[in-house]
Amino acid sequence: MRNTLTPLALALVAMALGACQTIGPGMYMSTLGGSEVEVPVDDNGQPITAKADITRITAEVVRDQLEQARQASYQLPPAPQEPYRRYRLGARDILSITVWDHPELTIPAGEFRAADQAGTVINEDGTIFYPYVGVVKAAGLTTEELRDTLTRRIARYIEAPQLDVRVAAYRSQKAYVVGEVKNPGIQSINDVPLTVTEAINRAGGVTEAADQRLVTLSRGSKVYQVDVQGIYERGDERQNVLLMDGDVLNVWDNELNKVFVLGEVGTQRSLRLNKGRLTLAEALGDAGGVDPVSSSPGKVFVIRGGRSDALAKPQIFHLDAASPDALLLADRFPLRPRDVVYVDTAPVTRWNRVISQILPTAQTLSASTATNFPLFEGQRTTQTTRVTR
């Protein structure tokens, strides 16, 4: 049995070697000029297709990325026309009304009845009934304004009345806090302004799984995004929005707050951003580093598809990490959620992988053909003998 390659096996190997750049196993970036894949993007409201450009990571690019991360813009709800100063009464609020020296006009709360159980409830039409005064419009007024109205009207029957109005139970306005908070549920709007941070604190604070950079506020038919982390870390009071009746504040989890490291690294994996902070160097390090044997350090890419807008034009950044000092740029390049970090394969590694897949097939073909050759030769010998005879 001969161990040499047959012409058929040699032809297969030659075809594989000639096309190794196109049939090589695994993913790789074939060009640094631009992406070869078209994706749908938004062009002034019209969906079109376009290819992403590949931008080389330089000091200027890192500076721009850091500035964009620092000045991340959020669409906030419009500020109220009137600044919040005092709570305004509404339907279903319960009032505690006291007239000094006139117990017959004072709420009979008594020893065993709380004020919110025996108080005056504002009707659905926003009015209340009070002795001597009759029906009074209360909704939309502050407690001071309602007190002045009752005092002025009851003065016709009582000389120099001293009257006080307080809210025994706030029930007309409420907001909802849901998601990754310790005590989700309804939060009543009272005389203390209910801001985003106040609502989260009333709900027991956020859980460990919360993404404080992704907090949404639903108001009517619109949804706004609030950066709670910016309030705590940078003192950005613009994010501390004043909640209104019917608002829904949703604290999202951090499952979307990930990046993916693929290619020739120690371990291909997904990484969760810690409070939205992760650099390219940290991602590569947490994934076991760049493989020193199989990788092409000059081809490290960051593919950014855009998380908030599905039709945003994707971006691809290229880092030439063949020189160790290039990692200074990687240590300052900020990643964003849903980024994909890809380390390309070295050409010699791709070559070896092609050969490792083709060689077993070539050897099998060679062994099979070599086994059949002696039979052919024996048949030809027998036929020659017969002709000679």
Image: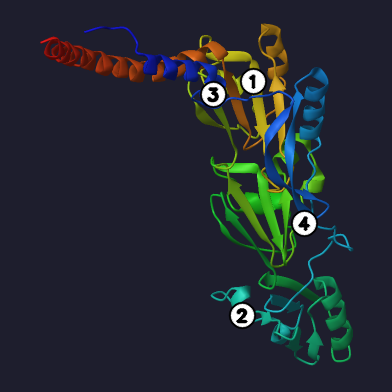
State the residue position of label 2. 118
**Residue 226 bears which disc, if any?**
none
Mark 1 crowdedness (10 Å alpha carbons): few <14, some 14-19, many ≥20: many
Which residue appears at 54% of the width and 54% of the height? 183
**Observer-nearest of 233 and 257:** 257
What secondary structure is marked by label 2?
Answer: helix
Q: Nearer the viewer, mark 3 or mark 2?
A: 3
State the residue position of label 3. 263
Q: Is residue 286 above or below residue 176?
A: above
State the residue position of label 1. 300
Q: Distance from label 3 to label 4 (Cα)?
A: 46 Å
Q: Is residue 252 above or below residue 141?
A: above
Question: Could you tell which of marks 1 and 2 lies nearer the N-terminus?
Answer: 2
Q: Three-letter amino acid code at disc 1?
A: Val
Q: Distance from label 1 to label 2 (Cα)?
A: 71 Å
Does the residue at mark 3 contact the one at mark 2 (Cβ under 8 Å)?
A: no
Q: Position of residue 152 (x, y in %)?
A: 89, 83
Q: Distance from label 3 to label 1 (Cα)?
A: 9 Å
